[in-house]
Amino acid sequence: MKIAIMGAMPEEIEPILSHLESYEKVDFAKNSYYKGKYKSLDVVVAYSKIGKVFSTLTATTMLEMFACDMLLFTGVAGAVNPELKIGDLIVATKLAQHDLDITIFGHPHGFVPGGSVYVQSDPDLRALAKIVASKLDIQLKEGVIATGDQFIADEEKKNFIASTFGADALEMEGASVAVVCDALGVPFFILRSISDAADMDAGFNFEEFVQSSAKISADFLMKMLDELIERMG
Ligand code: ADE
């Protein structure tokens, strides 16, 4: 099994790379991919750059060119659900593109013909995450993640995303990665740790907490890899 581990920013994958004994850097399509081993697992690690377009390119490359057969995403998100605080972990049950809008033609927000508003993540990987969280006594929330090509720092936009998509958190890559994995039939898992509350303080909070929250998410993902290895015997 070869596992794709993806983030959007360097801060999101650096804690993963630091756990690999060795890796090889392969450049493709103006991005770098790190092929290596974590214990007995073959992994390919990359950050895509921010947004839906770059994350689509990276996810597709990891699955098609590097032939990964599972994709795990780690990174940070803005909280929509007020229960989520900075540093908390959220696993996406399903994801939607909040900025996809052809509502003028009578379609719901986030929908285009041939697609669907939501893409569901892999239930087995979510179950694995729950087991890891309970073993380590870590709080792990599941919920809806909304994705768009905007950094949200505005209560009105946040409330629209909350009420339209039932979102618990928002970010800029998850739903596009989900669309790629769903189309190619590859199980995927999207994990985020909260860096801000997508409000007027979001820019400031993001800068302060991106690194620490990215590490919280990456560290949890490493524990999931350990659990996977243990299961494979
Ligand atoms: N990722 C982390 N915080 C975010 C925000 N407020 N908007 C979009 N993406 C984010």
Image: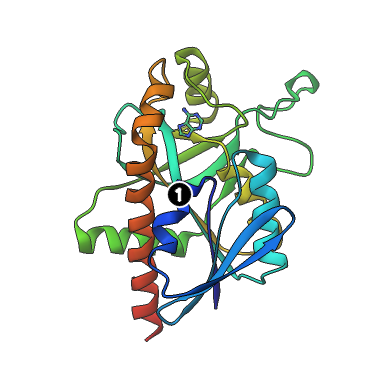
Residue 29 or residue 53, whichever sits in front: 29
> In x, y percent, where is residue 92?
46, 46
Task: Please report the residue visible at 32 percent of the width from the left and 58 percent of the height from the top.
Answer: 130
Residue 179 or residue 23, whichever sits in front: 23
Please state if 23 lies on the left or on the right of 132 as rendered: right
**Going by the picture, which residue comes out furthest to the left?**
137
Task: Please report the residue visible at 77 percent of the width from the left and 18 percent of the height from the top.
Answer: 104
**100 versus 70 height, above or below:** above
Task: Please report the residue visible at 67 percent of the width from the left and 45 percent of the height from the top.
Answer: 54
> In x, y percent, where is residue 176?
64, 45
Residue of label 1: 12
Query: Which of the 4 image quadrants contains residue 116?
Result: top right
**Going by the picture, which residue comes out furthest to the bottom?**
233
Q: Is residue 70 visible?
A: yes
Task: Please report the residue visible at 47 percent of the width from the left and 39 percent of the height from the top.
Answer: 144
Residue type marked 1: Glu
**232 versus 14 height, above or below:** below
Q: Is residue 196 visible?
A: no
> In x, y percent, where is residue 69?
60, 71
